[in-house]
Image: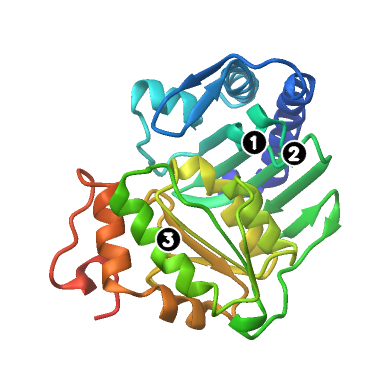
Amino acid sequence: MADIDSLPEFLASAIDAAKRAGEIIRNGFYETKHVEHKGEVDLVTETDKACEELIINHLKQLYPTHKFIGEETAAAQGDTELTDEPTWIIDPVDGTTNFVHGFPFVCVSIGLTIRKVPSVGVVYNPIMNELFTGIHGKGAFLNGVPIKVSSQTELISSLLVTENGAKLDKLTVDTHTKKLNSLLFKVRSVRACGSLALNLCGVACGRLDICYQVGFGGPWDVAAGAVIIREAGGIVYDPSGAEFDITSQRVAASNPFLKDALVEFLDDALFLSLYLKALLPKQLSLPTDRSAHGFPS
C-alpha cells in the first residue's frame, strides 16, 4: 500500500528524469546523428543510449529496490520479464526515426507498474514542449492542464492513428496494408506519426479518436500511454476486444463509445492470426479455439 501512497512522489521523480533526458534530445535534435540498426527498420542513436542511462541511473538512486525495463537494455540483454515489483518501463527516445530525420514527434516515455498495473505515466516531447502525465485514479494532464478523450461516437467521423510496425516482410506489409486500405472507407482520415507513446497521448487529449497497433517494440511503447489514456477517460484494450496485456505487443485505444465499432472491424481472423504469426513466430501460436487467447469465438 505504501507504493500506492507514493504515486505523486514517483510521478515527480519521473518528470524530473524525463526533463533531464529531454534536454539531451533537444540538444541533439539538429545535430548530426550517429545511427545504428537494431532491426530491419528500428534505429538506435547515441542519444537513445545516453537518455536511457541517465533515466535509469537517476531513478535507481532514488528507488534502489525497484526493477527496471529499458528499451535499449532489453534489446542488448533480452530482459523484459515483468513482475509484481514496482517496475519502471522506459523508452528513452520513442520516435527515433523521427529524431534522425528531424521530424518533431519525439518523446521520452516513462511508465511505472505496480503489481503489473500501469500506475504512473510520463510522456515528454521536448521539441514541442509538451508534457503528458497521469497517475492511477488522479487524472491526466498536458502541461498541468487536465485532458480528456474525445466524445466522438461515430467511426466514420473519427481520426485514426496507426503505424506499420517493426517488420517489413511481404506477409506483414500486405496484411497491414489490406486492413488499412479497408479502414480508409470507415474513418474520416488516418495518421501515422511515428511514435506510439505520442499516438496514445493524442487519443488521451482528444486530438485523435482511435489508435491501434500490432507488432511494436515492447512494453516501453505503451506503459506510460496506457495510464494517461485511462486517466483521461479512455480505454486501452487488445485489438480483439480482450483485456489489454502490456507485454503482448498489441494495443488499441479510444474513448468508450468507439471500442465496439473498432473491435468489430479489427476482429478479422486473417488479420489477427497471419499478422501476429508474421510478427511473433516464436512467441505466439494461435490455436483453432481463438477464445483460448481471449478472442471472441
In terms of image quadrants, where is residue 286?
bottom left
Q: Earlier in the sequence, mark 3 or mark 1?
A: 1
Asked if the residues shown at circle 2 and circle 1 are in contact, with their CB atoms under 8 angstroms apart, the answer is yes
At mark 1, the secondary structure is: helix
Q: Which mark is residue 177?
A: 3
Q: Does residue 232 appear anywhere in the picture?
A: yes
Residue type, label 1: Asn
Residue drawn 78% across the image and 24% down it: 23
- Image quarter where the C terminus lies is bottom left
Q: How many other residues sit within 10 Å of disc 1, few (<14), some (14-19) or many (≥20)?
A: some
Q: Earlier in the sequence, mark 3 or mark 2?
A: 2
At mark 2, the secondary structure is: loop
Q: Which mark is residue 131?
A: none
Residue type, label 3: Thr
At mark 3, the secondary structure is: helix
Q: Is residue 243 above or below residue 129?
A: below
Q: Earlier in the sequence, mark 2 or mark 1?
A: 1
Residue type, label 2: Pro
- For disc 2, the marked residue is 104
Asked if the residues shown at circle 3 and circle 1 are in contact, with their CB atoms under 8 angstroms apart, the answer is no
Which one is closest to the eye, mark 3 or mark 1?
3
x then y, percent, for residue 64: 54, 22
x then y, percent, for residue 151: 72, 80
Could you tell me how far apart the alpha carbons at marks 3 and 1 are, in whole angstroms? Answer: 21 Å
42 with respect to 267 (left or right): right
Which of 194/110 is in front? Answer: 194
Q: Which mark is residue 98?
A: 1
